[in-house]
Amino acid sequence: MPNPTAPYPAEAAPDLAALDRPRLPLALRAPVQARTWREFGYLLLNLPAAIVFFVYAVTMVSLGAGLLVTFLGVPVLAAALAGCRALGALERARARTLLKLDVATPEPLRARNGRTGLLAWTGALFRSGSSWRHLLYAFAHFPWAVLSFAVSLTVMANAWALFTYPLWQWILPAHYGQEGLQVYGDGEPGHGWYLDTPLEQLLATAVGAVLVMASPWLVRGMAQVDRTMVLHLLGPSRLSSRVRELESDRGVVVDTAAADLRRIERDLHDGAQARLVALAMDLGLAKEKLLSDPPTAARMVDEAHGEVKLALQELRDLARGIHPAILTDRGLGPALSSVATRCRVPVRITVDLPVRPAPAIEGIAYFTVSELLQNVAKHSGARTAWVDVWRAADRILIQVRDDGRGGANLTTGTGLSGLAERLGSVDGLFVLDSPAGGPTTVTAELPWRER
C-alpha cells in the first residue's frame, strides 16, 4: 500500500505555478472580479461626491469674490480653500478604499517665520499650491464625474440586462402587455421591433455577453482617469515631495556625521590617546630610573618605543577610516585594492571608470565597498568575494558578491540599513539579494558627478 505522506516522484510532482494560475482567461474573469465592481462603485459615487464638492466650491468662491470689496472676502476665500482641503481628504479616502490608490497627504500648511494665529493660517492657505489644486479639482472633476456616472451606469446596466434577457423577458408580456423588449418603434401600438422570438432573445444575449466582457475595460479606463486626477491634484506635488525627501536626507546626513564624529572621538579616547598617556607615564618612570638603574630604564625606553609604533599605526588606521590618502592621491581602483588586501576573504576587484568621479561620490563608493567587505569577512563565511565598479550613463554602479551562506537582510542590525540610508541621502539606491544558502549580491547606485 503506498505511503500517502511519501514525496511525489520527480515525474509526478505537481506544477505549483500551474495550480496557482487562474483557470479562466482574464476576459472571462474581469466582469465578475471585485476590482471591476469596486471601480464601478467609485464611478457611481462620483456624481454625488462631485456635486457636493462643486457646489461648495462655487458657493464659497462666489461669496468670497463678492465680498472682496470688504475685508470679509479674504477669510471667506480662506474658508473655501480649507473646506476644499477637507473634502479632498474624503476623496483620497474614497480612492484608497475603492481604487486601492494610496495617495500621500499634501504638505502641511506652514506659516512664515513660525508665526501663529488666524492671519498666519490664512496666509499659509493662500500660499499653498495644494490648496489651489484642491479647488481646481472641484471644478475639473465635476463634468468628468457626470460623464463617467452616465456612461458607466448606462453601459453596465444595458450589458447585464441584455445578457440576462432570457431570465426576465417574461415580465414584459405578463405585466406590461408587450411582446418583448422594444428595440425600435414609432409610438403606434404594434409598430416596432420587439425581441420576442427565441432567435432574437439569443441574439440579445450574445450582444449582452460582448458588452459584459467589454464593460470592465471601459470602467477601468474611466477609473484610471480618476486615479490620475486624484494623484496629481489631491496629492503632494513633486516639488513638495522632493523637499520632504531632501529634508529627510539632510537629517540622515547630519545624524551620520554626528555618529562619525562620536566614533572618531571614541577611537581616539580608547585607542591612541590612552596609549599615549601610558607612554608618557612609562617615559616618566624611565627618566627616574635613568641614573639609579640604567638597564631597567633602557628596557622601559625600548618598550615605550614599541608603544610609539603601535600608537602611530592606530592613528594611521584612524586617518584611513576618515579619508585614506591613497584614495585622494590615486583614485578608487587602487584604494579598493588596498582594502581588498586587508580583507580576510580573497577579493577580486574590477573598477572600470573612464575618469574619476567627484570626491564626495568617490568617498561614498569607497566606504560602501569597505563596509560591505567587512560584513563579508565577519558574517558570510565566504571563500571568495567579487567587487565590480563601473559607470552606466549618469550613475556609478557598485556590485559586491560573495559565495557565503547568505541570509542577510536589512532588518537585523544597523550596518546594512545604515548604509542604505547613507546612499539614499545622496539620491543613491541600495539593493540586497541574499537568499538562505547564498550567494549574496549587493548592488548600489550613486549619481555620477564629474570632478
Image (cartoon, helix red, strand yellow):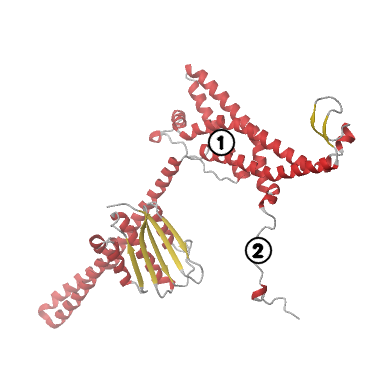
Choose between 40 and 317: the one closer to the eye: 40
The residue carrying pointer 1 sits among few (fewer than 14), some (14 to 19) or many (20 or more) residues within 10 Å by Cα, namely many
Rendering quarter of residue 299: bottom left
* Res 206 seen here: yes
For the point 41% across and 43% down, which residue is it?
243
Picture coordinates of residue 397 (x, y %)?
38, 59
- Residue 351: give its label: none
Choose the circle earlier in sequence order: 2 or 1.
Answer: 2
Q: Nearer the viewer, mark 2 or mark 1?
A: 2
Q: CA distance from mark 2 to mark 1?
A: 43 Å
Lateral position of residue 80 relative to residue 208, left or right: left
Q: Which mark is residue 18?
A: 2
The residue that mark 1 highlights is 88
Image check: 145 left or right of 196?
left
Asked if residue 261 can be seen in this view, the reply is no
Q: Amino acid at mark 2?
A: Ala
The residue at the point 22 percent across, 61 percent down is 329
Please state which amino acid type lies under the numbered disc 1. Gly
Pick the residue in front: 316 or 175.
Answer: 175
- For label 2, the crowd category at 10 Å Cα-Cα, with few meaning under 14, some 14 to 19 and many 20 or more, is few
Residues tagged 2 and 1 counted as in contact (Cβ below 8 A) = no
Q: Quadrant of residue 194?
A: top right
Percent from the top left, x then y, of residue 416?
Answer: 42, 62
Q: Which quarter shows the N terminus?
A: bottom right
